[in-house]
Amino acid sequence: DFELKSTAEKVWGTIRDSTTIFPQALSHDYKSIQVLEGDGKAPGSVRLINYAEGSPIVKVSKERIESVDEAEKKYVYSIIDGDLLKYYKTFFGKIIVVPKGESSLVKWSCEFEKASEEIPDPSVIKEFAVKNFKEIDDYLHGKA
């Protein structure tokens, strides 16, 4: 869990439009996000993410949107192909944006199954997600 200065509505809107916004706002981390199936927002949509040099261990990943709850501002995705699956047999991410007055609380969590016992927990991925959200927060405040 981490707090952002931006309102929950702004943060949620950025997550929902991340296909366009992340490569623009975070070009040092995201080269491109391409919609392969669906509209890129609805459950069942599949997106191909090409990461830039700022990404620690992953350069390419394909994710499927598993569920979206607009009222709860909850987004669940799974990684279905790409570099991450060298380390984890399965990987699900969940993002929940909670209004907190004029700011917001972002809850990012993941469920995973390691490819082998030697693989560490995905703390580097969590740190990357937190860094991205803090940079998106700064981006939103720069545009405000």
Image (spheres, rainbow, N blue to C red):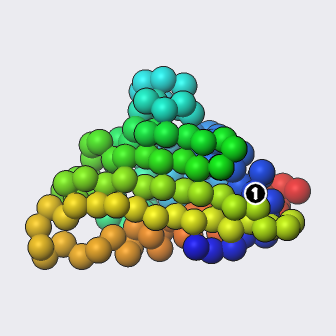
Residue 131: percent from the left, percent from the top? Answer: 56, 70
Q: Which amino acid does the dot numbered 1 rest on?
A: Ala
The residue most toward the top is 38
- Nearer the observer, 65 or 36: 65
Residue 71 found in image quarter: top right
The residue most toward the front is 71
Residue 91: percent from the left, percent from the top? Answer: 31, 55
Give above or below for 31 relative to 116.
Answer: above
Residue 84: percent from the left, percent from the top? Answer: 28, 56
Residue drawn 18% across the image and 72% down it: 119
Q: What residue is shown with label 1?
A: 8
- Nearer the observer, 131 or 27: 131
Give above or below for 143 relative to 61.
Answer: below
Secondary element under disc 1, as helix, strand or loop, is helix
In which quadrant is the N terminus drawn? bottom right
Residue drawn 59% across the image and 57% down it: 96
106 with respect to 58 (left or right): right
In which quadrant is the C terminus drawn? bottom right
Counting other residues with Cα less than 10 Å from the Cα at mark 1, is it few (<14), some (14-19), or many (20 or more)? many
94 with respect to 12 (left or right): left
Residue drawn 32% across the image and 64% down it: 57
80 with respect to 86 (left or right): right
Question: Can I make out residue 24 in this image?
Answer: no
Give above or below for 123 relative to 90.
Answer: below
Residue 2 found in image quarter: bottom right
- Nearer the observer, 120 or 94: 94
Residue 132: percent from the left, percent from the top? Answer: 57, 64
